[in-house]
């Protein structure tokens, strides 16, 4: 029993020595859109800003949870009217990383997002209005991410990723707005509209 205990202790120490934990941050440029049968795929330029941690089990595998503020949304146009949606989230992806080489990893994992801001800007025939649609936006957004990371140095990295939303971004019901003295009411069923996000980011690990 004593020998077994010693072997287990040595194994734990060896695994801890092999493991590597790094913390860091990243900023990025995003092209966001909606997808689904009830909306087009027009892209909107946006941005992201976040913190990350990477725990490397061995030279080939790591896990990297993140907390990212992401400006998201999409746009659509019909019969001369254009609507741009600005939906901001606090996203928490947990990426599993496979290092194909010491500097290059393929990243995949789930993501949960929490909506903090939702507005829609509509333009038609020279008129423009911005409406707060947070009450019509689902609070939680689930999705998955797939991408890659290239480590420029031991600390600096660049990253490309696509996040695919799997749950509807908006919910059904109705909401009334007072805009410059006019009563506006939006109503409808829960549309088949989900988030999509193409990301390019630069980061530093410490």
Image (tube, rainbow, N blue to C red):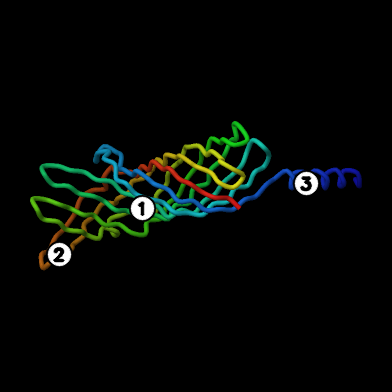
Q: Residues within 10 Å of mark 3 (few under 14, many from 20)?
A: few
Give the distance between the C-alpha atoms of the residues marked 1 and 2, in whole angstroms.
24 Å
Q: Residue furthest left?
A: 125
Label disc, if present, on residue 12 of the rendered structure: 3
Front residue of 11 and 62: 62
Secondary structure at numbered mark 2: strand
Q: Earlier in the sequence, mark 3 or mark 1?
A: 3
Q: Earlier in the sequence, mark 2 or mark 3?
A: 3
204 up-or-down from 145: above or below = below
Label disc, if present, on residue 192 of the rendered structure: none
Image position of 47 (left or right of 176): right
At x 78%, y 44%, the residue is 14
Q: Residues within 10 Å of mark 2 (few under 14, many from 20)?
A: few
Residue that numbered label 1 is attached to:
71
Q: Residue furthest front?
A: 153
Front residue of 151 and 78: 151
Residue that numbered label 2 is attached to:
179
Let me know if residue 136 appears in the view. yes
Q: Residue furthest right?
A: 2
């Amino acid at each position: 029993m004593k020998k077994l205990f010693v072997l287990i202790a040595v194994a734990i120490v060896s695994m801890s020595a092999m493991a590597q934990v790094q913390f860091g941050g990243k900023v990025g440029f995003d092209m966001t859109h909606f997808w689904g049968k009830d909306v087009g795929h027009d892209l909107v330029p946006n941005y992201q800003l976040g913190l990350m941690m990477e725990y490397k089990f061995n030279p080939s595998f790591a896990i990297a949870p993140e907390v990212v503020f992401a400006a998201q949304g999409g746009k659509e146009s019909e019969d001369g009217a254009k609507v741009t949606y600005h939906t901001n989230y606090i996203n928490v992806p947990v990426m599993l990383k496979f290092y194909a080489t010491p500097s290059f990893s393929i990243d995949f994992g789930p993501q949960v997002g929490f909506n903090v801001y939702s507005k829609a800007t509509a333009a038609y025939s020279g008129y423009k209005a911005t409406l707060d649609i947070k009450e019509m936006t689902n609070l939680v957004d689930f999705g998955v991410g797939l991408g890659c990371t290239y480590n420029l140095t031991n600390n600096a990295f660049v990253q490309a990723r696509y996040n695919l939303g799997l749950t509807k971004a908006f919910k059904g019901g109705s909401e009334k707005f007072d805009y410059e003295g006019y009563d506006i009411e939006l109503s409808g069923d829960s549309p088949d509209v989900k988030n999509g996000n193409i990301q390019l980011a630069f980061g530093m690990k410490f």
